[in-house]
Image (spheres, rainbow, N blue to C red):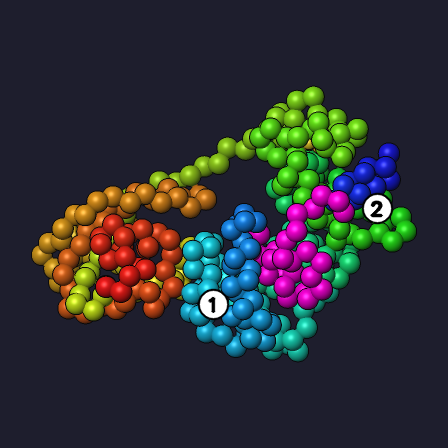
Amino acid sequence: MSSDLHSALLTWYQRHQRRLPWRGEPDPYRVLLSEVLLQQTRVEQAIPYYHRFLQRFPTLEALAQAEQEAVLQVWQGCGYYTRARNLHRLAQQVVAAGGVLPQSARGLRALPGIGPYTAAAVASIAFGEPAAAVDGNVRRVLSRLLAWEHPTPKQVQEAADALLSALVQQKDARPGDWNQALMELGATVCTPQNPGCGGCPVAAFCQGKASPAHYPASRVRKQKSLELVALVLQGPEGVYLEQRQGPVLGGLWGVPMEEGPGALERLLARFGLDSAELVGPVRHEFTHRKLHIRVYRAPWVAGENPVRRPLSRLDQKILALAGASPTQPV
Ligand code: SF4
């Protein structure tokens, strides 16, 4: 059955894969960039960033030589900025060691920001290593094929490894195509809602097709709620911005913000102000955090034009609410 399943999926992939700018790309740096972008960004949103990034940093060397702020500026709006900071560190590390990306999943995993999925995807697509890449799409497809409701990550990885090892016994096996075919099936046919089982190339092998919505059972995502206060200090030239620290928005610029009880008082004290005008609330969600932000505004002595700095979407929302749009000179 296994070789029939392989050929059914690979034939479908050859005919129906989406034309994406990184498909068939021989340059490992470009493959790596596409995989890092796709870690947390949908394909349609990733495409313009892929082009933008390569236009500015066409090679690993060019990326290594850039300032972190320039890298974040190009990534601006794409979210999950840790990816950009890690990619930058990765480039610097690889260039310092001779400029050649490791060709194995194991070697790639030692680099900043490269987890098991990205390492396997890049090693298989760019270097042909038989390493099974398991992302959310692959997990869903395999859980449905095997009618698994609560598979552990280990079980899914082992199933993916077994399928790939069976493939590499065959002549002219291309592990990168296989990984991409599974992901493509999950992204376009075996979708989370309303999977297209009627037109699915592997329906004959699927044990879960009678009730695909059961497989895998959905995982409950816990989101923490945070109460924050943001202070937009507006000067004649623009707004006061500071560089954020920490894992979420570190390296980006934004307006001063504080969390929890007494947040406004602490902000006012920090800038020697008696009061500030409340302009409204902003809500913003990250994967594990839901932010409720009260935005205040006050006059200030100096500031700068926010278009010159890499800002997160969150800070763009805050500035827009306070009438200091980041897309307009202020
Ligand atoms: S038959 Fe349906 S559930 Fe099974 S792999 Fe295909 S799309 Fe997914």
Side of 237 where 178 appears, left or right: right
In whole angstroms, how far apart are the C-alphas of marks 1 and 2? 39 Å
Res. 146 in view: no
**What amino acid does circle 1 point to?**
Val
Q: Is residue 140 above or below residue 244?
A: above
Q: Within 10 angstroms of label 1, few (less than 14), some, or many (20 or more) residues?
A: many
Query: Considering the image in quadrants, where does the N terminus appear?
Result: top right
Residue placed furthest toward the top: 210
Q: Nearer the viewer, residue 112 or 123?
A: 123
Residue 138 on image: x %, y %: 67, 41
Task: Please state the horizontal and vertical placement of residue 74, each as a whole percent of the image.
Answer: 46, 64
Ligand 1 resides in the quarter of the picture at top right
Looking at the picture, tell me which residue is in the foreground, 306 or 229.
306
Percent coordinates x, y for residue 109 in the rendering: 65, 60
Residue 186 in the image: above or below residue 77: above
Q: Is residue 34 magenta?
A: yes
**Residue at 36% across, 45% down:** 284
Q: Quadrant of residue 68?
A: bottom left
Q: Which residue is found at the position 63% from the left and 53% from the top?
A: 20
Residue bounds of the magenta highlight:
14-39
Residue 55 relative to residue 125: left or right: left
Amino acid, disc 2: Leu
Quarter of the image holding residue 159? top right
Question: Total label count?
Answer: 2
Query: On residue 167, which mark appears?
Result: 2
Mark 2 residue's CB less than 8 Å from ligand 1: no
Q: Which mark is residue 71?
A: 1
